[in-house]
Image (cartoon, rainbow, N blue to C red):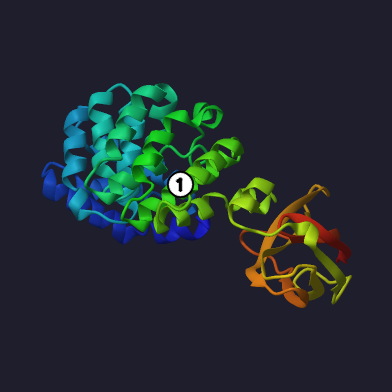
Amino acid sequence: MADKLKDTLFPLEKVQLFGTVLKEVYPSFQSEEFVAAVCDKDWPERELKEKMRHATLCLHQFLPQNFEKAVEILVAIVPKVTGFEAIVLPDYVEVYGQKHWDIALPALGELTKCGSSEFGIRPFLNKDLEGAMKYMLAWADSDDFRVRRFASEGCRPRLPWASGVPALKKDPSLILPILEKLKDDPEEFVRKSVANNLNDISKDHPKLVLDICERWQGNSKNTDWIIKHACRTLLKQGNKRAMLLFGFANPELMKVEDFQLSNTSPAIGDDISFRFKLALDTKQKQKVRIEYIVHFVKANGKTSPKVFQIKEVEMKPGVHTINKKHTFKNMTTRKHYPGEHTFEIVINGDVKASAKLQLN
């Protein structure tokens, strides 16, 4: 994905437009020299984060060296920028604002309105967690939904692509007041961040997240959506308490029979299908979550499991036939390697059947 983004977010015309916008606000800005510095001979080959940081360093050459004056210029162009410069602006504050917290932190709250400052806040969280989280808590009350979303997204313990915040992984208690403020936010953009934050926390503190979800359940449609999305990892792990929270039936009442793979020696790039019969020994309809796990062979020869959901459905008592297709085509997110792969059928968190195939 990064290979595509580096080409779509950083084209020459965007760099030129950025220079033009900066010159409108700061007439002394040398826009042509800035563009030449950014788009040097190595520019096309740089990865996304490398391009961002390179643009930040170039920007510093052509802005006032006084941090406060430079930030005033960056904040002034916020209404006029979209695209790559929206990523560069908070990165500038991250790199050059560590000694100017009283200027840098409010600036991140403004710059997030054109492109999230979620990455830029991370070093501040690591340097003084309590000090930075006071800003995050205040941003949760903002009238601007983008700032409210930043209040949650910026302090996610496991934010993708971002530097880690070990203290929040160990103890997420400072995050919880922010999530409480935002749990019924009118904007889905914000609520999704709350759910993702809770999902991050659940990987280290499942009991804490389940306590919160049980307390929020039934408060509103918004909180019910949040807790389901927040528990997605726990559900994939077959956490019994999470299963009960969402009304999934006792898996002991269900059996998987006649599990068959269409091909037990496919080649990389092939599709296979599989089928099985699911028998419900109950007297009434039951809520059922049907998944399968593939234990993929990795480059080092070891295996790693990946959970795929088939469906969630209410089922009548009796026997039901389930059919599914699986592909072994290589993707940007998954590369396949030859070797023995194990398939497992999971019903409401319990592994009910397994089969092996040899991928060639």
Horizontally, residue 38 falls left or right of residue 354, namely left
Residue 112: where, in percent of width, then height?
29, 45
Who's the residue at 38% across and 49% down the image?
Answer: 40
Q: Secondary structure at mark 1?
A: helix
Image-quadrant location for residue 287: bottom right
Residue 276 appears left or right of 53: right
Q: Note whether 18 is above or below 207 in the view shown.
A: below
Instruction: Judge whether 82 appears above or below 263 on screen.
Output: above
Residue, x 69% and y 48% (percent of image)? 240
Outermost front residue: 283
Seen at 41% across and 59% down, the residue is: 221
Q: Is residue 235 above or below residue 65?
A: below
Q: Which residue is mark 1?
A: 216
**Residue type for callout 1:** Trp
Q: Does the image show residue 337?
A: no
Q: Callout 1: few (<14), some (14-19), or many (20+) C-alpha neighbours within 10 Å? A: some
**Residue 168, how many percent across, how many down?**
50, 30
Residue 68 seen in the figure: yes
Residue 274 percent coordinates (x, y): 80, 74
Residue 177 or residue 241, whichever sits in front: 241
Q: 64 or 105: nearer the eye? A: 105
Q: Residue at x 55, y 28 (%)?
A: 170
Q: Is residue 270 left or right of residue 125?
A: right
